Amino acid sequence: MRIAHYEPWGLLNQFYKDLEKVYAQPSNSTDEDTTVATSAWAPAVDIKEDEQRFVIHADIPGVDPQEIEITMEGGVLTIKGERQAESQEERRNYKRIERTRGTFYRRFSLPDTADAEKITATGKQGVLEIIIPKHLIVQPRKINVEC
């Protein structure tokens, strides 16, 4: 008869070690080395499509529209900006702070029909509106065969 050593937590401990390896950050990395952009908050958006264009409405109250960076590259529209925090002295009298401050970063993949050259953006009353026209699609023309 053989005696087997039983470790009831062995499998769980191995799983924990595997998770640590997956989520471990290299000690020599810096914030500049990361390729994934993160943000403190993300504005709520509505995206609408009609026959001629896409329209994105983003709720960004408290952000100067001139400070928002909008780029279109490789079919991906990127919206970046920052809502400035109030000074520490003004926060002392607050009982509750629910309005998020800090940077935001949103990305949207757009179809090939989006015309990157004609994108426009306006900001009014805390809402950013981005209009992305579609390329004109040439409709197929039916050709009659004469007999």
Image (cartoon, rainbow, N blue to C red):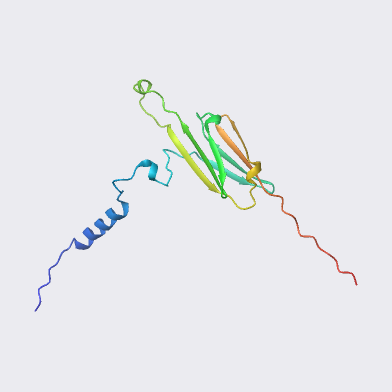
Residue drawn at (63%, 41%), measured in percent from left and top? 119
Q: Is residue 138 above or below residue 116?
A: below
In this view, the residue farthest toward the right is 147
In this view, the residue farthest toward the bottom is 1
Q: Is residue 12 left or right of residue 36?
A: left
Residue drawn at (39%, 45%), measured in percent from left and top? 34
* Closer to the camera in the image, 28 or 4: 28
Question: In the rendering, at what x and y percent does residue 8 appear?
Answer: 17, 63
Question: In the rendering, at what x and y percent does residue 124 appear?
Answer: 59, 30
Residue 116 figure quarter: top right
Q: Is residue 44 left or right of residue 142?
A: left
In this view, the residue farthest toward the front is 28
Q: Is residue 139 above or below residue 6?
A: above
Q: Quadrant of the C terminus?
A: bottom right
Residue 41 figure quarter: top left
Q: Total label count?
A: 0
Q: Is residue 119 above or below residue 19?
A: above
* Closer to the camera in the image, 51 or 143: 143
Question: In the rendering, at what x and y percent does residue 145 appear?
Answer: 86, 69
Q: Quadrant of the N terminus?
A: bottom left
Q: Is residue 132 left or right of residue 30?
A: right
Residue drawn at (22%, 63%), measured in percent from left and top? 11
Question: In the rendering, at what x and y percent does residue 49 appear?
Answer: 63, 47
